[in-house]
Amino acid sequence: MASRIRDVFTILRSGLFAHRLYARVYLGGSRAAPFALLHYVLKGEAQNAHPCAFFNPAHLRATAPHKRGNLFAAFLRGGAVLPACAQFVPAWYRARTPTASQLSPWLHFQKFGIPARLDPSPAISLRFIEDAYCDKPAQLPRQLYEILARQGNNPLPPLTLAALERTQARFRAQIELTIHRQLPQRRHRNLVFVQTAGGHPASIEHGRHYDLMLNHYAATTAGRDADYVLTQRGTKVSAINKILQQHPDLLLRYDHVLFLDDDVEMHAPAINELFSIMAREQLDLAQPALTPDSISAFPSLLTQPGGAPIRRFNTVEIMAPALSARALARCGWVFGSGISGYGVDLLLGSEVRAQFGNTVALINNITARHTRPPDKQGGAFYRFMTASGIDPMAEMRVLIKKHGLTHGIRPL
């Protein structure tokens, strides 16, 4: 008992134990913070719980098996010179620390390095983590803790820009695009592309005056009335990017292309009219307004009864963008800037307006219905992205930071 009391005071005096974060991750909520340290000393360390970011009991136990008792307390009493975790490289950090210190590299990093955004190893960039995983800079300590503490046996997400780009490149390299049916030349002036698993609404297939391309991301290749049938086990934006790279004429031969998700309900007459309005108004990027019962994160995209027929926007949503041929030819590279599609729509609108001026709009009198909520809480798409090492929100934040984009979709 005396040794445990001593351990508790050692850890308390250090000021490094993450009471609230520990409680959030291991005790079900930050309200349990007053009991976090006691839980760690009595049970948590034996279960490989992390007392703070960049200290992993399992790592120290494996690299210093002679140590007994509470490892974190012993680590602190010993000057914090033992290997604290795999993600902190003392020699690498010391070589790059701008000022000499009497503290060990690990203690210097905890007290001064994290606030100054000094990197703990070549595999981790704190500024990238701040850009990719934090809405505000003050969230960095929490994100560091949660990324490392929740790792378990799972691989870490990309923690540098180079790591993210390698993950994206691996995803693209694994995609195989197969064309099962195609037209030798276009029948109509415009094209509708549908990213589908076979469950898209039949209303887009009948009464149409446009060609239809079904891109299946599941095994089925059924196409009831399609001019093109493709399969590609990727995402919507990775499919568009792959087609533009390997078979660009399949898209660029058309005056306009509408890219639909399979949970967007539109009728063929409305789509025909959408293309007519784009041509008449010389729009390069547009989307239909959403019906009032649609699920959308952007209320401004809902149709406005009695509103202006054409409402100029900074961009449109990735679920249903329609592009002119010239916009697709000159801005199509944007579809290769991400995997999930998050943030790609923001960059697309920015590039189209930079190239062609204020030619981005919501067409208020043409409506579509979005039937499913965003897939952010463990749905099939979210699980697919997680298994592929892709964090959609991180991709979006990186694109916003890299290109200086405005967050959100808004009318001009």
Image: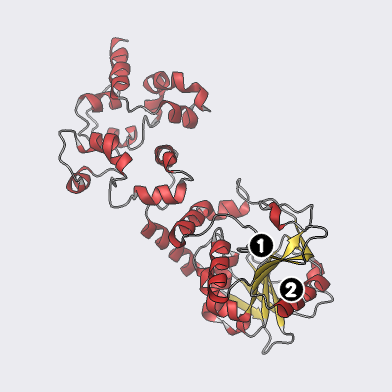
Count residues near mark 2 (Cα–Cα under 10 Å), then give few for <14, some for 14-19, many for 20+.
some
Q: Residues within 10 Å of mark 1 (few under 14, many from 20)?
A: many
Q: Where does residue 291 sit, x and y in percent of width and height?
A: 79, 57
Residue 377 in the image: above or below residue 236:
above
Instruction: Looking at the picture, tell me which residue is in the foreground, 211 or 352.
Output: 352
Q: Quadrant of the C terminus?
A: bottom right
Q: Is residue 386 visible?
A: no
Residue drawn at 45 percent across, 51 percent down: 132
Q: Where residue 228 appears, x then y in whole percent?
A: 69, 79
Q: Secondary structure at mark 1?
A: loop
Given this view, does label 1 or label 2 mark the residue nearer the observer?
A: 1
Residue at the image point whose x is 32% and y is 28% from the top:
16
* The furthest residue to the bottom: 185
| Residue on which the image places disc 2 | 223
Quadrant of the drawing holding the N terminus: top left
Residue 244 shows up from this direction: yes
Image height check: is 344 above or below 131? Answer: below
Q: Dot 1 corresponds to which residue?
A: 319
Tell me what residue is drawn at x 59 percent, y 85 percent: 249
Taking the image as shown, residue 84 lies to the left or right of residue 94, namely right
- Mark 2: amino acid: Gly
Is residue 362 positioned above or below 212 on the image? above
